[in-house]
Image (cartoon, helix red, strand yellow):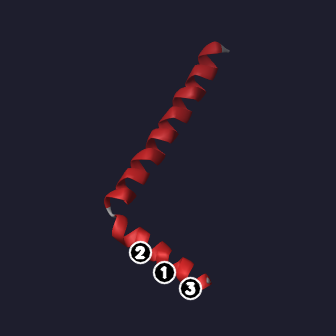
Amino acid sequence: MKLYTDLKQIRLVGKVNEIQAALRQISEQPLTLHAYLQQVSQQKI
């Protein structure tokens, strides 16, 4: 049972690392996403 929960935690940590890596890739191209979000939010106002 302990091994099973450890494996689940390892998988969760892997997912978190994947998400953080994706966010880092997005933040390396801040202009595209940031400008797009600004345009969208300005249109809503």
Label 2 CA crowd tier, 10 Å (few <14, some 14–19, many 20+): few
Kind of residue at badge 3: Gln
Residue 39, disc: 1
Quadrant of the image containing the C terminus: bottom right
Q: Where does the image place residue 39, in percent across and percent down from the top left?
A: 48, 81
Picture coordinates of residue 19, whole percent (x, y): 48, 47
| Up-down relation of residue 26 to residue 15 (above or below) | below
- Residue found at x 35% / y 70%: 31
Q: CA distance from mark 3 to mark 2?
A: 12 Å
Q: Are marks 1 and 3 in contact (CB under 8 Å)?
A: yes
Q: Give x and y (percent) for residue 41.
A: 56, 77
Disc ID at residue 43: 3
Residue marked by disc 2: 35
- Separation of residues labelled 1 and 3 (CA atoms): 6 Å
| Distance Cα–Cα, label 2 vs label 1 | 6 Å
What is the crowding at mark 1: few (fewer than 14 residues within 10 Å), some, or many (at least 20)? Answer: few
| Furthest-top residue in this view | 2
- Residues 41 and 32: in front is 41
Amino acid bearing label 2: Ala
Image coordinates for residue 11, horizontal then vertical, percent: 53, 33
Residue at the front extreme?
Answer: 45
Side of 45 where 37 appears, left or right: left
Mark 2 lies on a secondary structure that is helix
SS of the residue under disc 1:
helix
